[in-house]
Structures are given as structure tokens and as C-alpha cells.
Amino acid sequence: MLALLVTASLGMVAAQQTQPAVSFLPLSPQAGEAVTVKVVVPAATTLAKLGNLEVSQIGSSKQVFKPVSLKDGVATYTVNLAKDGTYRMTLAGQPVQIIKVGVPKDRLQSPILHLNFDGKNPLADLSGYGNDGKVIGKVQYPTGKVGKGLSFDSEASYIEFPRSAVLETPTPNMTMSVWVKPGEQRGYADFFTKGDWNVLKTDAKNGSISFFTGGWRRGETELAQPKDWEGNWHHLVGVVEGQEARLYLDGKLVQESEVEGELKYTSFPWNLGRNAEEPKGRGFTGTMDEVRIYPFALTSAEVAQLYTITQK
């Protein structure tokens, strides 16, 4: 039985909706599998006052699930999702989680975070999970690789993402992808991070680009910056698949490394343009575009395809 733990700021009668603060969930449950949903609720909540968990597939009628138990502020529900598709879960009228069931037909169209910096809201998450970015400081939206991009003028400017269910789940398989056009760099520049545990960064001092995930320097994979690095667009993709990490540059696999050590979790949020755990002296100046996270390891063929489609 799969388990989903959601930590939420839930009031039984709420004036406004809130997103979960921390959660752990199965990212790709199969249709017909029983999913145990555990929601952290206020300590004063009783089983009698606890609401039903409503689950609805987009475009279909909702299913209602009664609580199985309530212990130490954690409410337990058992949910069976019969069909493939995207479901929304709500409790006491508040959104708890979106969950996608089944294997996607096109994996490149199934990220858990996707920003292209176009449209009325440049920081809107196009994945469907609602992980819209928040600007800290000042940013600009100049010409990107395609359409608009995101530009940082100093390390005081960056983007922060919510600590939502889908982004907070540690996974042994994942992919981080971004187009970057670096400005002048003088040292470390962390351009896509979750603390110092999931990182795509560059080091101007030794002319390197590196990637690691699931812990500090866990499976660190490093390659040399191309000669035309500064002032030009390049596509970077970091992939971890179990005990193997891969780093791609402009659609091609350049470096691989062995992943050792236990998969770990950090509560620092995902950032663009800086590292929340090491916020000083490591900001990224330059422009980026087409930011994506996948909850699975893309193949080399898929990375090459992603390199092609994100230029159109």
C-alpha cells in the first residue's frame, strides 16, 4: 500500500485556502492501488470534527473518503484511485494535493515544475501542480532562448518556490533541466538549487559545471565549461537514476558518476538564482529559460529530444 503524508496548515473552518507546508507522497502511483493519505491537522481537532477527504479527477465527479483514524494530530485516509489521470484532493474545502496516477504517455510533458517565463504571469508553473515562483528582490524578463527569459542583476535577486507536496518528496530518480546564458562569474554561481543538497552550479575559479542531488556532493558530477560559456545559451540537464548520476550539456551526455550514500531530505526551498542554504557570495548573474524538474530519470534520447523542443 502506498503512503502519502501531507503536513498542512488546515483549519476546519478557514477564511482562505492554504497549500501544504511539507509533504511526502508517491509521485507515480498506479491505477487501482490503495493510497494511504496522512494529513497533519491542528492538535485540537477531533475525529468527530474531522472532515472527509474529497478526491476528484479533473472533468469527473468527486469521490469522498471518510477518515480511518486520527492520532497525534495525524489524520489517516485510505484512497483508491481507479483510473489514470490527474486528481485533486481537498479537506474541509481546502486544497491538500494534486496527484497524477499512471504512467504518462509522453514523459517530457509530465514535469512537476515547468517555467518558461512567458504569458501574463511569467512565474506560473506550467506543470499543473501550481508551484508558481515568487520573486525576491528584482528580476527582469528579457529575451530568452525562446520568448522571454528570467534575468538576475545581483545575488539579492532570486526566485523561491513553495514547499509543496510534490517538490518536497525525496526521490532516487529525478531530472533537473534549465537553459542558461551566464553573465560574468567570479566564483561559485548556484543557478538551480534546493539548499546545498540538490544543485546545478558553476565555479568560475576552476571553470567547472557540477550537479549533485539527495545530499551534499552526493553523486557529484562535474564537467568543464565550454569555451563560449559566458554570454551564450547552453542547455544543462542533471539526471540521477538510482546509483548513477549523469550531466548533459547541449543535449549530449558529457559526464557520469557513481552515486554513493543515503538519499537525504532538506527543508530548504527550491530556488532559481541562488542557494538558500548558502545565500551569500554564490548568486547567479545572467539569464535562464525553460526550467523543469521531472520526478524520474530521463534517458539520453529524451534529453536530446528535450534539447530540441525547448528551442522552438
Image: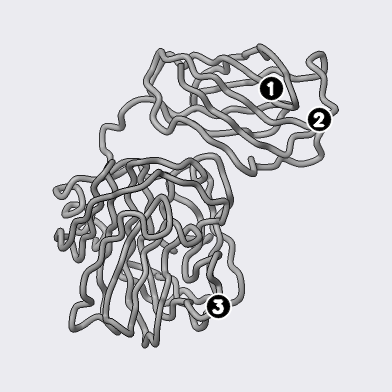
Distance between the alpha carbons at the discs numbered 3 and 2: 38 Å
The residue depicted at 42 percent of the width and 53 percent of the height is 215
Nearer to us of marks 1 and 3 is 3
Question: Does 34 sit above or below residue 14?
Answer: above
Tags 3 and 2 touching, CB below 8 Å? no
The residue depicted at 36 percent of the width and 47 percent of the height is 261
Label number found at residue 43: 2
The answer to which of marks 1 and 2 sits earlier in the sequence is 2
Q: Amino acid at mark 2?
A: Ala
Total numbered labels: 3
Q: Secondary structure at mark 1?
A: strand
The residue depicted at 28 percent of the width and 41 percent of the height is 242
> In the rendering, at what x and y percent does residue 110 appear?
35, 41
Nearer to me, 33 or 93: 33
Question: Does 185 sit above or below residue 15?
Answer: below
The answer to which of marks 1 and 3 sits earlier in the sequence is 1
Mark 1, residue position? 75
Label number found at residue 137: none
Mark 3, residue position? 280
Distance between the alpha carbons at the discs numbered 1 and 2: 11 Å
Nearer to me, 63 or 243: 243
Q: Secondary structure at mark 3?
A: loop
Disc 2: CA contacts within 10 A as few (<14), some (14-19) or many (>=20) = few
Q: Amino acid at mark 1?
A: Ala
The residue depicted at 25 percent of the width and 52 percent of the height is 245
> Relative to 200, is 97 on the left or the right?
right
